[in-house]
């Protein structure tokens, strides 16, 4: 999907009809639009969303006021006015023109609900247009609504992607984007097929097979119920954790509670570090004991072994190493190395022959000699083990003390908030504590249901084996059982395929997130996308991996890194699928439109993010304010900008106001006093 242009008609702040060119190429993929706070950057972002899907993002206020206010006020009662967004774009070799519109009749000063109309035209090879019979379905097939947030987003709120509770949704969204939902649909249809087959088995398979199938059906029903319960618990956890985060944020903003809450945040971060360091030391101690602990019990054994070897050596029971082949050669030649004749039956030959027999012990001798040398090393290793254990014990005790101190301080801060004389502070803290208790209970329920599902899966597998061994004489029942076994095998194979694809997808996303994040930040932090699609941040201190409490800026960088990773993976997956097929070369390509991409980042991060942005997607539309976009940002992006624009804000708030923006050495209107509040989208050539 590549954007060509957007046209707004009376859309919120934008008065009249205004068009903006969005065409770009691989060399200059960026469209850069400047606008003051409140001028309409978020409105322009939402124009894309409304045009494609017919709604606005949740953060938009007064959502019912879609028509530009000054235009609405000039419409007489009984009159009508049109609001519309038109998008031109191409996708997989096909050109599209989309127009979502609504005509609103004025009955009073209040704007009523809109009755939308969506039209979609495709351009035919001869240049004519064809109207789509199912425009919304076509749009959804190009870019599903639920994954659009990866490509049309507000940078100030993008950190929601990495907040607690968002991971399950993100995982599902990525699956939609990468077409893994097709496997889900296939799996959903298999139980229906299997039910028809097992009904035949119960009907014709005899009492034993029917009884086993009844048990299988009951276990399967229990499994479905448990899976439903788990989904409900997961959803409840998401809601509860979001509520707890919101209440905690209220405490941070509360004038009296803020200092205490901020200190508690700091203590909780330090407590998490201390617990992680303690757990790491405990794990290191366990590994040391498992691999080297035996050395602690070798003290007397080593001494006894060395004493035994020395005594045997002195008795001559352990001769110095002597090659038996050498002695054999002396006996064969009949002359000793000292020149003495080794005649048959003589004493000299008898002595050498005795050495020949003792030379057979050379392997034993070598082992003993080696062991004697290792006894000393064993003693040193035992001392080393003792020192290592002593160091670890000290570390564990220190971390335990730190955990205890921090837990005590946290408890004290909890008490200050809970017992605050300020009623709303105490009430907020009580709600936070109540939510924490409910969350803990939900996690216990989650664990119980998960264990139950594992048990049900094992029972189902056993019963399926019992069914395969049950005696069935009816030919129809035998076929039904065989086909049911095949359906279950296919279902299991699809589940394994889905798990492999999901894991592969996660690993690739994880690697790309790491690469983008590393290119942006100067801090030694490493992000990880775990099995639950939770983005965490950690760093290593003294060999211990510790979690990093993420700031708003770090959440924003993490989210941008994730969006870049998703965009790249979508292109790669479609390219892999296209190999040997006839898909268009731009399959899997989507633009990224972002507002406030730089948030509250400092200049160093703004420059680094700017470098990362131009590589995020084949086409970008970046909406920024002067404070965010001038300086290092525009310097970094300007060589890659194909379209430059300004949202010129007109305001009645202050008379005589006049503010300009200087781009490429030329001054352009930025804010102007006017008789009405509205915005104009200006193209800078």
Image: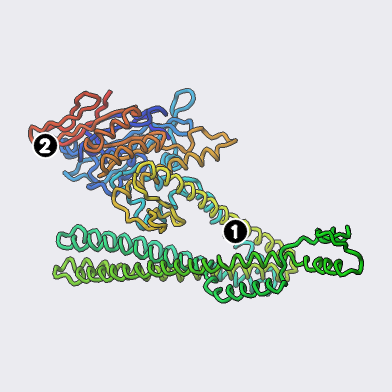
Quarter holding the C terminus is top left
What residue occupies the far front of the structure in this picture? Answer: 339
Looking at the picture, how far across and down is residue 363, in whole percent? 73, 64
Percent position of residue 24, x then y: 38, 28
Between discs 1 and 2, the one toward the N terminus: 1
Instruction: Give neighbour class at mark 1: few <14, some 14-19, many 20+ (Cα, 10 Å).
Output: few
* Residues at marks 1 and 2 touching, judged by CB atoms closer than 8 Å: no
Tell me the residue that label 2 is attached to.
Answer: 652
Question: Whole-Å distance between the Cαs marked 1 and 2?
Answer: 66 Å
Residue pointed to by mark 1:
492
User: Could you tell me residue 448's position as x and y percent?
Assistant: 46, 71
Total count of labels: 2
Residue 629 visible to the viewer: yes
Q: Nearer the viewer, residue 84 or 270?
A: 270
Mark identifier at residue 594: none
- Taking 466 as reference, is 449 left or right? left
């Amino acid at each position: 999907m590549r954007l060509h242009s957007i046209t707004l008609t009376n859309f919120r702040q934008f008065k009249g009809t205004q068009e903006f060119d969005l065409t770009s190429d691989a060399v200059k993929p960026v469209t850069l639009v400047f606008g003051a706070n409140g001028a309409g950057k978020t409105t322009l972002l939402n124009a894309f969303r409304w045009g494609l899907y017919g709604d606005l993002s949740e953060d938009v206020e007064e959502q019912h006021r879609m028509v530009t206010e000054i235009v609405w006020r000039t419409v007489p009662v009984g009159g009508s006015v049109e609001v519309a967004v038109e998008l031109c774009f191409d996708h997989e070799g096909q050109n599209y023109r989309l127009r979502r519109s609504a005509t609103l009749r004025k009955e009073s000063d209040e704007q009523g609900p809109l009755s939308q109309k969506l039209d979609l035209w495709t351009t035919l090879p001869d240049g004519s247009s064809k109207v789509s019979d199912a425009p919304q379905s076509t749009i959804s097939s190009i870019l599903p609504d639920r994954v659009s947030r990866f490509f049309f987003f507000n940078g100030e709120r993008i950190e929601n992607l990495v907040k607690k509770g968002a991971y399950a949704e993100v995982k599902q969204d990525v699956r939609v984007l990468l077409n893994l939902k097709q496997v889900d649909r296939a799996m959903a249809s298999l139980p229906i097929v299997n039910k028809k087959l097992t009904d035949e088995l119960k009907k014709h398979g005899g009492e034993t097979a029917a009884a086993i199938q009844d048990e299988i059906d009951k276990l399967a029903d229990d499994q479905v119920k448990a899976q439903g319960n788990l989904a409900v618990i997961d959803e409840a956890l998401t809601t509860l954790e979001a509520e707890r985060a919101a209440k905690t944020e209220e405490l941070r903003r509360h004038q009296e509670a803020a200092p205490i809450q901020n200190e508690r945040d700091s203590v909780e971060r330090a407590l998490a570090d201390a617990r992680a360091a303690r757990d790491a030391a405990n794990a290191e101690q366990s590994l040391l004991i498992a691999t080297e602990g035996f050395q602690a019990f070798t003290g007397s054994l080593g001494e006894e072994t060395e004493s035994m070897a020395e005594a045997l050596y002195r008795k001559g029971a352990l001769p110095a190493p002597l090659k038996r082949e050498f002695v054999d050669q002396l006996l064969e030649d009949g002359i000793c190395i000292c020149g003495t004749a080794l005649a048959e039956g003589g004493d000299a030959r008898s002595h050498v022959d005795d050495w020949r027999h003792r030379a057979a012990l050379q392997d034993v001798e070598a082992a003993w000699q080696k062991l004697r040398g290792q006894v000393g090393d064993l003693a040193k290793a035992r001392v080393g083990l003792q020192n290592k254990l002593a160091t670890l014990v000290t570390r564990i005790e220190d971390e335990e003390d730190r955990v205890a101190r921090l837990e005590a301080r946290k408890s004290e801060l909890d008490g200050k908030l809970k017992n605050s004389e300020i009623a709303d502070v105490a009430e907020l803290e009580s709600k936070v504590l109540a939510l924490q208790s409910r969350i803990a209970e939900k996690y216990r329920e989650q664990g119980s249901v998960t264990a139950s599902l594992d048990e049900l899966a094992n029972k189902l597998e056993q019963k399926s084996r019992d069914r395969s061994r049950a005696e069935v004489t009816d030919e129809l029942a035998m076929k039904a059982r065989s086909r049911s076994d095949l359906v279950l095998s296919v279902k299991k194979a699809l589940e394994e395929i889905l798990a492999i694809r999901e894991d592969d997808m996660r690993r690739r996303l994880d690697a790309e997130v790491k690469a983008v994040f590393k290119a942006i930040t100067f801090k030694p932090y490493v992000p990880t996308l775990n099995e639950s699609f939770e983005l965490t941040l950690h760093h290593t201190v003294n060999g211990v991996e510790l979690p990093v409490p993420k700031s708003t800026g770090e959440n924003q960088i993490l989210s941008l890194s994730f969006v870049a990773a998703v965009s790249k993976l979508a292109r790669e997956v479609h390219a892999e699928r296209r190999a040997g097929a006839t898909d268009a070369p731009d399959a899997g390509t989507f633009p990224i439109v972002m507002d406030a991409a730089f948030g509250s980042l400092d200049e160093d991060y703004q420059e680094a993010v700017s470098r990362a942005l131009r590589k995020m997607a084949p086409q970008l539309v970046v909406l920024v304010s002067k404070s965010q976009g001038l300086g290092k940002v525009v310097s970094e992006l300007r060589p890659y900008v194909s379209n430059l624009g300004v949202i010129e804000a007109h305001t009645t708030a202050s008379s005589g106001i006049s503010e300009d923006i200087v781009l490429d050495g030329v001054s352009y209107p930025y804010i102007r006093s006017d008789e009405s509040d509205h915005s104009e989208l200006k193209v800078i050539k």
